[in-house]
Image (cartoon, helix red, strand yellow):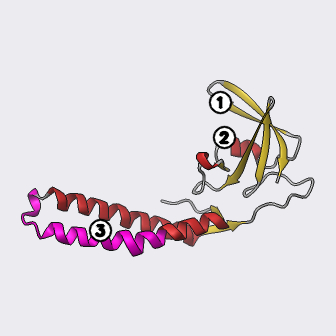
Amino acid sequence: MIQDEIYLTKQGREDLEKELRQLKDVKLPQLIDRVAKARSFGDLSENSEYANAREDLAFVEGRIDEIEEILNKAQIIKKSNSKKGNAVSIGSIVTLKIKNKEMTFTVVGEWEADPNEKKISRDSPLGRALIGKKEGEQAEVEAPAGKIVYTVHKIH
């Protein structure tokens, strides 16, 4: 079950819509064809290709349902303005300092989070610590290695 509050950036919504079109227009027809071909091979009880094709089809149909539900419930968040005094919120691009190192993250909803793209969920430990912070304030995060203190250097 998908939570009631879903937040997406405009780009996140576009990415999900693109994935949905790809699944519906390309993958689903291919899998339906694959199931039909596998069915023609004969005895379904010993037909591993048929079983695999049905499994793949069920997965894609489930993902389509999931994306449609996300898109129906999603609230689009706007990127925050860079006016002085703004606090970190969903959609903010934040540059943090830890010791002498700087890192930049975008705070997004959970369905868009992708650490490889420096997109952190507002529900992650770092995301929760950053929400509401202003430039110059510190955010503390408990990590397995101990407490990490980040300073909000800039909110873009």
Q: Secondary structure at mark 1?
A: strand
Q: Image point 86% across, 58% down: which residue? A: 82
CB contact under 8 Å: marks 1 and 2: yes
**30 up-or-down from 137: above or below:** below
Q: Is residue 13 left or right of residue 102?
A: left
Q: Residue 143 shows which numbered tag? A: 1
Q: Is residue 30 left or right of residue 94?
A: left
Q: Nearer the viewer, residue 133 or 136?
A: 136
In magenta stretch: residue 122? no
Residue on which disc 2 sits = 125
Q: Secondary structure at mark 3?
A: helix
**Which mark is first along the chain, 2 or 3?**
3
In magenta stretch: residue 36? yes
Amino acid type, label 3: Leu
Q: Nearer the viewer, mark 3 or mark 1?
A: 3
Q: Residues within 10 Å of mark 3 (few under 14, many from 20)?
A: some
Amino acid type, label 1: Ala
Q: Give me the C-alpha separation between circle 3 and circle 1.
A: 43 Å
x then y, percent, for residue 104: 74, 45
Q: Image point 60% across, 54% down: which residue? A: 110
Q: Nearer the viewer, residue 92 or 4?
A: 92
Q: Residue 89 shows which numbered tag? A: none
The image quarter containing residue 74 is bottom right
Span colored in magenta: 20-46
Q: Residue furthest right?
A: 84
x then y, percent, for residue 88: 80, 51
Q: Residue furthest top?
A: 145
Q: Image point 79% across, 45% down: which residue? A: 95
The image quarter containing residue 58 is bottom left
Q: Residue 31 shows which numbered tag? A: 3
